[in-house]
């Protein structure tokens, strides 16, 4: 199993550009989430999904869209990039059940100039 | 709104010493997680704590949960350099909810 795969690892965008951060997992995990990590602020939840076709907002959803058409993939779309979206983005997944923790991808470091 | 506070934010300790990281949260929850993150790397799951009085141990790390006090601790015993990392706790906001709120993290540095 490859686990949780995020692409790209690094990206530089200009203000106003759009892009999609990719996240794929091959563990048949139903639950998937996107977080952003900023210095001194821990991780903050952007959007999450409890299964294909089901998504919901997290703490900081503005400026981001998600969809979940398959169990494996959970892409994060930046609609019109802003410098405030400069961050490290992590995708995570887990199986249902209380005893299981999330498996995190390796992250995407995004810089918006 | 669920708030999660960790302390200390920074901790520098000598090898061989014991110390505790604290994680307080503001509302009831059914799950608490501890994660480790090395610089520039992803997060690694350490423990999942579910019930009051739960205690889990892995090597030199031991985590406990007091749901009545809304407090979890991560205890480090006889620290070694390899434990240097940032440690996060994360709490699920409601029963069965997947909205995790993370603490700001504790950056632990073990000095030889």
Image (cartoon, coloured by chain):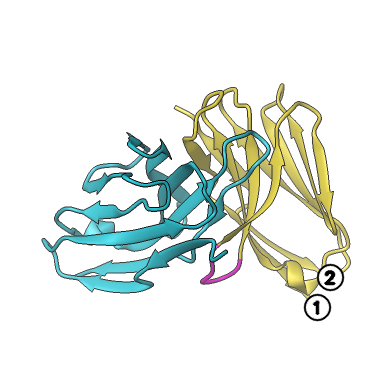
Mark 1 falls on what kind of element? loop
Secondary structure mostly seen in the magenta stretch:
loop
Output the letter for the chain in yellow: B
The disc, 2 or 1, on the residue closer to the chain's N-terminal end is 2
Residue hosting label 2: B15
* Residue at the limit of the structure toward the left, as seen here: A16
Residue B60: x and y in percent read 85, 58
Q: Is residue A33 above or below residue B87?
A: above
On residue A112, which mark appears? Answer: none
The stretch drawn in magenta includes residue A94: no
For the residue pair A1 and A19, the one nearer the viewer reads as A1
**Residue B61 visible:** yes
Q: What chain is tagged by disc 2?
A: B
Residue with the mark numbered 1: B112
Chain A rendered in what hue?
cyan
Q: In what element is the residue under mark 2?
A: loop
Let me know if residue A42 appears in the view. no
Q: Are marks 2 and 1 in contact (CB under 8 Å)?
A: yes
- Does residue B41 show up magenta in the picture? yes
Residue at the image position 63 percent from the left and 53 percent from the top: B35
Q: Looking at the figure, which quarter contains the C terminus of chain A?
A: bottom left
Other-residue count near label 1 (Cα within 10 Å), few / some / many at <14 / 14–19 / ≥20: few
Which residues, given as a range, are shown in magenta? B38-42
Check disc 2: other Cα within 10 Å, few if <14, some if 14-19, many if 20+.
some
């Amino acid at each position: 199993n490859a686990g949780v795969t995020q692409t790209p690892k690094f990206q530089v965008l200009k203000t106003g550009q759009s892009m999609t951060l990719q996240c794929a997992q091959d563990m048949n995990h139903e639950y998937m989430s996107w977080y952003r990590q900023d210095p001194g602020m821990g991780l903050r939840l952007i959007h999450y999904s409890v299964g294909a076709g089901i998504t919901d907002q997290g703490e900081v959803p503005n400026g981001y869209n998600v969809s979940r058409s398959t169990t494996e993939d959970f892409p994060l779309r930046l609609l019109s990039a802003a410098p405030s979206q400069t961050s490290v983005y992590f995708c995570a997944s887990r199986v249902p059940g209380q005893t299981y923790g999330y498996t995190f991808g390796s992250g995407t470091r995004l810089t918006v100039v | 709104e669920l708030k999660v506070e960790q302390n200390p934010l920074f901790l520098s300790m000598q090898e061989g010493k014991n110390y505790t990281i604290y994680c307080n949260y503001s509302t009831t929850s059914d799950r608490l997680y501890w994660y480790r993150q090395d610089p520039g790397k992803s997060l690694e799951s350490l423990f999942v704590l579910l019930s009051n009085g739960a205690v889990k141990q892995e090597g030199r790390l031991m985590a406990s949960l007091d749901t009545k006090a809304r407090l979890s601790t991560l205890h480090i015993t006889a620290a070694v350099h390899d434990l240097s990392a940032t440690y996060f706790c994360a709490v699920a906001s409601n029963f069965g909810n997947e909205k995790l709120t993370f603490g700001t993290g504790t950056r632990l540095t073990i000095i030889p």
